[in-house]
Image (cartoon, grey):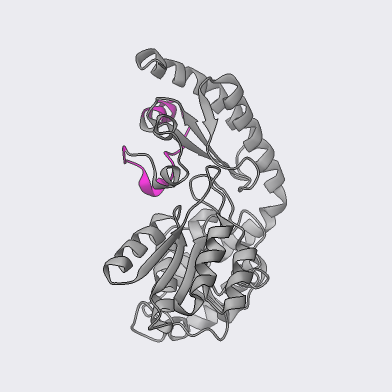
Amino acid sequence: MGERWSGKKKCGISKSLVGCGESEILFTGGGTESVNTAIRGLLAARAPRRKIITTTVEHSATRELCSQLQKEGFEVVEIPVGSDGLLDRDRFSQELSAKAEQVALVTLMWANNETGVLFPVSWVGSQCQKLKVPFHCDATQVVGKAPVDVRAAAMDVVSFASHKFHGPKGVGALYVRRGLRMPPLVIGGPQERGRRGGTENVPGIVGMGKAAELALASLPTMDGVRALRDRLERHILESIPHTRLNGHPTERLPNTTNIGFYQLEAEAILLLLSEQGVYASAGSACSSGSLEPSAVLRAMRVDDRYAHGAVRFSLSHYTTDAEVDRALAVLPQTVDRLRAVLPVA
């Protein structure tokens, strides 16, 4: 029964949104479970290989899992990024080709969740394909915001989550290339063709399928989202002194900007903004509440005086000109109020 109903919803997610076959999609409980399933599954299938290649700016789902795997005896190599957040391609090629026969998998994100900076995943996929190393891509930030074709990019496993394209929370998906051997993380019943045990979240999957249809239809509007993002970003950088863009100016998602406010705390900025109906985040939503600069900004070697005050503004095709105007009206007053208490040296 599960395959009959879920297969219909996989049509919108698989063929149109990510470019794969229905049988190559399995549903999970979210992006983090998808990442864990991908990495743990590939490691089990590639034993006794023990080397994992990743980057210094991954989402906590990958970063924390790799930290745990190190404790379990795996070798984890983190490829650095530049000050603009772009992948160090030379270092990646060196690590991948040096002892390719020892590499169990490559796991890296397509777009950074804090800065929106894009990695050259098609290039990474081709490098992995040449050396027959499985490539897992965390595409959580990209799916629904940009065209995705997992086959064209030579990806073996791709994880993503429903809520990142306005679907329900608590449901994710995993693309597994047809023919790739990968045991399940959750063992139990025969659900999802034996690749993920447990009763499926039917309402969540149906919602994810509908959200996929709507996200696909909205892709042509993303140029407008980019224009709004650029207007917001430009006015902030021009009108508020001692601010900087964190991340590459063009090689990033169209909806994300990360601005550093010199010698301020992001949490204080966000608190005052929220009181006036403007909502942003301190880097990643998963790291909110921490008083330390994010691991991503540290890896990019952003000056701590800017990193502490880094705020991520995320837009979508639902964002309006009036909302951007509101943010631009409120933000300078907020920064002035904070700097009156904590003046810039």
Residue 159 visible = no
Taking the spot 62% from the left edge, 78% from the top edge, the residue there is 21
Residue 56 drawn above or below residue 187 = above
**Relative side of 344 to 121, left or right:** left
| Image quadrant where residue 17 sits | bottom right
Between 305 and 109, the one nearer to me in the picture? 305
How many numbered marks appear? 0
| Image quadrant where residue 12 sits | bottom right
Q: Position of residue 332 (x, y in %)?
A: 51, 20
Q: Give the quarter of the figure containing the C terminus.
A: top left
Residue 95 drawn above or below residue 263 = below
Q: Position of residue 231 (x, y in %)?
A: 65, 31
- Residue 342 in the magenta stretch? The answer is no
Between 189 and 91, the one nearer to me in the picture? 91
Q: Position of residue 99 (x, y in %)?
A: 48, 75
Taking the spot 62% from the left edge, 53% from the top edge, the residue there is 145
Residue 288 visible = yes
In this picture, which residue range is highlighted in magenta?
268-291
Taking the spot 45% from the left edge, 20% from the top edge, the residue there is 335
Give the farthest residue toward the left.
71
| Image quadrant where residue 155 sits | bottom right
Q: Position of residue 319 (x, y in %)?
A: 60, 39
